[in-house]
Image (cartoon, rainbow, N blue to C red):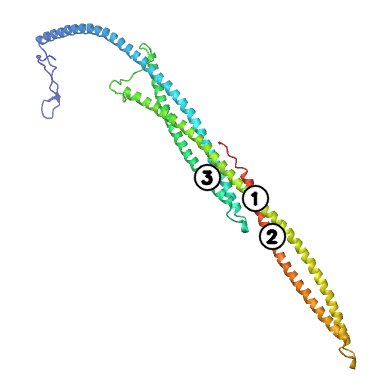
Amino acid sequence: MLPNLKARRITGMQLAGKHLGPVAKCPPRYSEEDWDYNNKIKFRITCDQEKLAERIVEESRRVVDETKDTTKNWQREVEHHMRERTSEIRFLVDELNRQKKTAMLEDEALNTYRNRVLNAIEFLKEKSLAICKQCLILREGRIGVDLCDDEVDRSLRRELKVIKGCQGLADAALKEAEEQIRKLRAAIYLLDQDLAAKDKSLAIDEKNLKLKEFQHDLGKGQDLSKSHCQFSLTEWQAQTYENLEANAKALVSAGQLRAYIDLLLKQVCEDMQNQTDRTNEAFERRIAETKHVKQCLENKHKDTMDHIHQVQRNMTDLEKEMMDKQRAITLCQTRLSNRAHRPGLELTCDMVQDALYNELQALKASVCKLNQKLNENKASMRYLMHVQVMQEEEINIKANTCKIDEVDCMTLRQALKYQSF
């Protein structure tokens, strides 16, 4: 509505009177001047808008041409930078793959060395330590004077000390190997993460290089012009080179650790084999000494048995002789008893009576001497029997010691064969 036109409008429904219905007014009316003025104004506006549209069309054509050139220039520059970027990413991806392959080979080799250390620890625990302790326990089964602190016991205790020392070194090497494997796998994980990110970035840039504006499958792109990158190119390069450097350090440390484990296992084998040989030599010397003493005791036991048999024969002879003398005494006493019944003056102490008295006294003296010798032989027999029992006990002790050292311990120790694991 033009501002200078007088508008006549219905202001609303009005009541004609109280309690009466509404009465409608007539529509507004304009003058001829309003009508003429309105037409002129509309024509003038139309002409102005047509001129403005023509000018806008010309400027739009110019802007279209400028934007086409600008777009082509920017597209060429972007594609050039994309090619450079993809070439740089491919180079880093190849380097990361090479480092990853080397790290995985080193991880496999280091895991093999870790298993070697585990085998050494298991052998020291299950074989060396168990056999050494078992030998000490078995040798506690010696009896009598053989239960002494001899060279074998001292060698076994030294061997036990060497085993525990080697176990400590192997345990420390195992911890170092596991820690180095952890560091190496952490470096491999970082390489994997970097490779995954770069592969995805490379795929995105290669896909972008293949895209053309006339393709029908472009889809709807999101306007990210106001979004900012989180990292700079320098930070991106620094992160990749830092991962490569960390992996290189882990590889160097792993190689040095493998060389140390090689040397350690070799030294452990040499130390354990030397100590085992020394202990075995102590066993062999002790077994030889025990066998020699046992043989001497057996020889003495044979001599003792001969003496026992000799004394037994002598005692038999003495007892027989005493029985003969006892019969002679009985005969003499019978004669004296018979002569005691002589009548009257016939009961005289004649030469016969004196001879019988002398004979009886001589026989009694002989029986006393024979009985004394018999008692001496019995005492000697008791001593010889005691010596025999003592010898047999000592022989049994030595036999038990030989069984423990030669049969039980040396049989167990045959399993102690050391190698480089």
- Residue 287: which disc? 1
The CA distance from mark 3 to mark 1 is: 24 Å
Q: SS at mark 3?
A: helix
Q: Position of residue 70 (x, y in %)?
A: 28, 10
- The answer to whether 300 is drawn above or below residue 189 in the figure is below
Q: SS at mark 2?
A: helix
Please tell me which residue is depicted at 78% across the width and 77% down the height of the picture. 368
Camera-side residue of 391 and 198: 391
Q: SS at mark 1?
A: helix
Residue 399 visible somewhere in the drawing: no
Q: Position of residue 323 (x, y in %)?
A: 83, 74
Task: Give the residue pinned by disc 3.
Answer: 162
User: Considering the image in quadrants, where does the N terminus appear?
Assistant: top left
In this rendering, would 241 be left or right of 328? left
Q: Please, what is the three-letter code of the amino acid marked with disc 1?
A: Ile
Task: Give the residue pinned by disc 2.
Answer: 391
- The answer to whether 85 is drawn above or below residue 190 in the figure is above
Q: Mark 3 or mark 2, which is nearer the start of the sequence? A: 3
